[in-house]
Image (cartoon, rainbow, N blue to C red):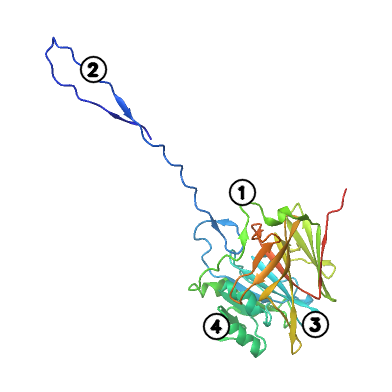
């Protein structure tokens, strides 16, 4: 800001009288304060920087089939967060959540299980599924989400069976249409802390990791292999690369492995997610050991490192593996040249 100059007027005087000169003086001013930085807005489920107001829509979660007949699934490669959980028979299913990008279609959707209300409650929004045992549907309907269930009047025009897959592995959801029907629902709260330009992801200070090997059961093994060129971990299951509809391996910026107790009631396993346990968080080809905790169904998952500091994820999508305590977790370091 330019300094202001004060001028003093000169009085009239006889010509023979010298006129006293006055000199201009500068009035000092304080230095201008530095401009405040532009506010930063993050997509709540990925931590990616976005324009203000561009992620105001509700999230849509869905119970996604992982039976071989359901593969490749539709649109889980675009999900912000994917949970994998043990179900009966030693198999797994997914609970995937979209918010930053809503796909035209997603699926195939299947029935809910008793752990699903604990997973989806902190996100709010919409939960899409194909039904389930009455006791589990009642649990989900008591949760703070809109239940979009196949076969109901409100989903008659948004759920359909695709002819490209066999029943019961063929129920797809017109996700954009469902979200458009529920503009009254708010966007989800941010679930995790995220790295910034000046503060790196927590895993980057951890152990270099080439492969993450997971065992859910004797028949369900999973692996994530660091792909530096892609900047993500690439997924395999049951010894084969897990491919999306475009023929590319499913990828994850962050892989969160949570060891969970599993209880069984009437032959249905439930991953117990309200509690605490051991965890590993992997980003950028590195892994940090952590502790997870969740105090109630509607509360988000908290992750802290061994020093008690909050874990910061890398901005991007996350897969959360709920590995039973009876299973196993193996971190494979890079091979030395």
Q: CA distance from mark 4 to mark 3?
A: 32 Å
Callout 4 crowding tier (Cα within 10 Å): few <14, some 14–19, many ≥20: some
Q: Please name the residue that numbered disc 2 is placed on.
A: 21
Choose mark 2 or mark 3, whichever is in front.
2
Q: Please name the residue that numbered disc 3 is placed on.
A: 89
Of the numbered discs 1 and 4, the one sitting upstream in the chain is: 4
Of the numbered discs 2 and 4, the one sitting upstream in the chain is: 2
Of the numbered discs 2 and 1, the one sitting upstream in the chain is: 2
Choose mark 1 or mark 4, whichever is in front.
1
Q: Which residue is pictured at 63% across the width and 79% down the height?
A: 117
Q: Please tell me in which quadrant of the rendered image residue 72 appears.
A: bottom right
Could you tell me if residue 259 is visible in this image?
A: yes
Q: CA distance from mark 2 to mark 4?
A: 89 Å
Q: Please name the residue that numbered disc 4 is placed on.
A: 154
Q: Position of residue 96 (x, y in %)?
A: 66, 71
Of the numbered discs 2 and 3, the one sitting upstream in the chain is: 2
Left or right placement of residue 66 versus residue 4 in this view: right
Q: Are marks 1 and 4 in contact (CB under 8 Å)?
A: no
Element class at badge 2: loop
Q: Quadrant of the N terminus?
A: top left
Which of 107 and 238 lies nearest the eye of the viewer? 238
């Amino acid at each position: 800001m330019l300094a202001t100059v004060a001028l003093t007027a000169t009085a009239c005087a006889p010509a023979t009288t010298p006129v006293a000169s006055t000199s201009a003086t500068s009035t000092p001013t304080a230095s201008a304060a530095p401009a405040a930085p532009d506010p930063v807005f993050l997509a709540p489920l990925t931590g990616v920087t976005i324009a203000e107001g561009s992620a105001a829509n509700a999230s849509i979660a869905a119970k996604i089939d992982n039976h071989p007949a359901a593969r490749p699934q539709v649109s889980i490669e675009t999900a912000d967060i994917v949970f994998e959980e043990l179900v009966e028979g030693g198999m797994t299913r997914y609970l995937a959540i979209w918010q930053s990008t809503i796909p035209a279609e997603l699926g195939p959707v299947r029935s809910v299980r008793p752990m699903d209300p604990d997973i989806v409650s902190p996100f709010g929004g919409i939960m899409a599924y194909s039904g389930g045992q009455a006791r589990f549907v009642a649990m989900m309907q008591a949760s703070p989400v809109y239940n979009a269930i196949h076969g109901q009047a409100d989903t008659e025009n948004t759920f359909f069976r695709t002819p490209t897959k066999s029943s019961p592995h063929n129920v797809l959801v017109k996700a954009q249409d469902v979200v458009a029907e529920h503009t009254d629902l708010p966007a989800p709260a941010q679930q995790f802390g995220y790295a910034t330009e000046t503060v790196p992801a927590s895993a980057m200070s951890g152990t270099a990791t080439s492969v993450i090997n997971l065992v859910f059961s004797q028949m369900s093994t999973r692996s994530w292999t660091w792909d530096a060129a892609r900047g993500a971990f690439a997924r395999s299951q049951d010894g084969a690369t897990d491919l999306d509809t475009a023929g590319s391996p499913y990828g994850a910026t962050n892989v969160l492995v949570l060891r969970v107790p599993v209880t069984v009631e009437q032959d249905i396993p439930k991953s117990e997610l309200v509690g605490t346990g051991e965890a590993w968080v992997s980003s950028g080809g590195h892994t940090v050991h952590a502790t997870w905790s969740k105090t109630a169904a509607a509360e988000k998952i908290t992750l802290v490192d061994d020093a008690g500091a909050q874990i910061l994820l890398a901005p991007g999508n996350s897969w959360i593996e709920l590995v039973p305590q009876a299973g196993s977790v193996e971190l494979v370091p890079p091979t030395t040249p």
